[in-house]
Image: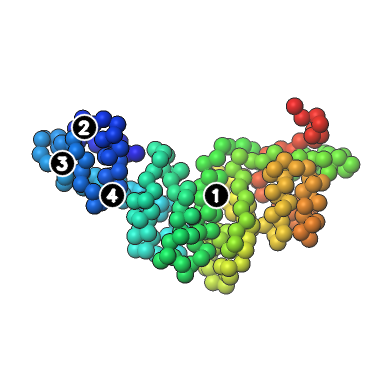
Amino acid sequence: MPALPQVFAMRLDPVANGAFAEALLMPDMPPPTGLTGRDGSSPARRFAVYRNNVTVSLIDAMASIFPTVHNLVGEDFFRAMARLYVTAHPPTSPLLFTYGEDFPAFLENFPPAADLPFLADVARVERLWLEAFHAADAAPFDPSALSRVPAEDLGAVRFQPHPATRIARLSHAAGTITRNDRAGVSLEGINPMAPETVLVTRPAFDAKIEILPKAGAGFFEALLAGKTLGEACLAASEENADIPTLISLTLTSGAFTAIDLHQESDRP
């Protein structure tokens, strides 16, 4: 909830404060009772200006959080769509980067975007990217550490996930679309209806989007869930995945920070 500007003087109880918040994002509602202008004049005009500024700020925040969605639908469509979202989904945190968590679900049920069924998955990827960007810092795993593990113990190795690592199975090629759009690469030739699994990591200062090889989701989901390398390879083999490629990506993607050789029975 934005801070109340000094142009208003308030003498409101908690119920009235709730009415103020509700009216702030509902353009057809009158200003709440108990509100007066700084100079004693009618507060309606000042409140309308403040209400518009709050809405525009939230729409701008949405455009910065979902730049690929914005680019796909265009400026006018996005701002009109975002205005409807803002009205129906007011922020619940003062941290704007957390805003829009349920925007993908909103897009799935937004009839004007029905011709772009992949749009909700693009929004999901963009949320994962933002979560990864704001996650805690940690040094990525040094691949040379694995070479020091005896061959007979490799199957028991567990990988500690990086705080920024995110994974999602998607019904559309939203990872490729988002990655190409953010890199300024043409989207020509992409089949948006092709399913993908994306791995979002942040090995350095910026988050990056990896498109996992076909049938690679089970492998990374197992490792991220604390399963051993042997168990992850078994999951991958059941999906006929390219295990050497997946292991290589495990070592180079920045998705993990360390390895652990403790057996499950050894854990506290």
User: Is residue 98 left or right of 147 when viewed as pictured?
Assistant: left
* Disc 1 secondary structure class: helix
Nearer to the camera, 265 or 52: 265
Residue located at (15% from left, 41% from top): 43
* Disc 4 secondary structure class: loop
Bin the neighbour count of mark 2 within 10 Å (Cα to Cα): few under 14, some 14-19, many 20 and up: some
Q: Which quarter of the rendering shows the N terminus? A: top left
Disc 4 residue type?
A: Met
Label ID, residue 43: 3
Disc 3 residue type?
A: Pro
Mark sitting earlier along the chain (3/4)? 4
**Whole-number angstrom distance, CA of label 1 to CA of label 3:** 41 Å
Bin the neighbour count of mark 1 within 10 Å (Cα to Cα): few under 14, some 14-19, many 20 and up: many
* Disc 3 secondary structure class: loop
Nearer to the camera, 218 or 126: 218
Label ID, residue 128: 1
Residue position for label 2: 10
- Viewer-nearest of labels 1 and 2? 2
Q: Which residue lies furthest to the top in this view?
A: 268
Residue position for label 4: 26
Check the image and report above or below for 233 versus 241. Answer: above
**Whole-number angstrom distance, CA of label 1 to CA of label 2:** 39 Å
- Viewer-nearest of labels 3 and 4? 4
Nearer to the camera, 22 or 55: 22
Mark sitting earlier along the chain (1/2)? 2
Disc 2 residue type?
A: Met
Q: Which residue lies furthest to the front in this view?
A: 15
Mark sitting earlier along the chain (1/4)? 4
Q: Which quarter of the rendering shows the C terminus? A: top right
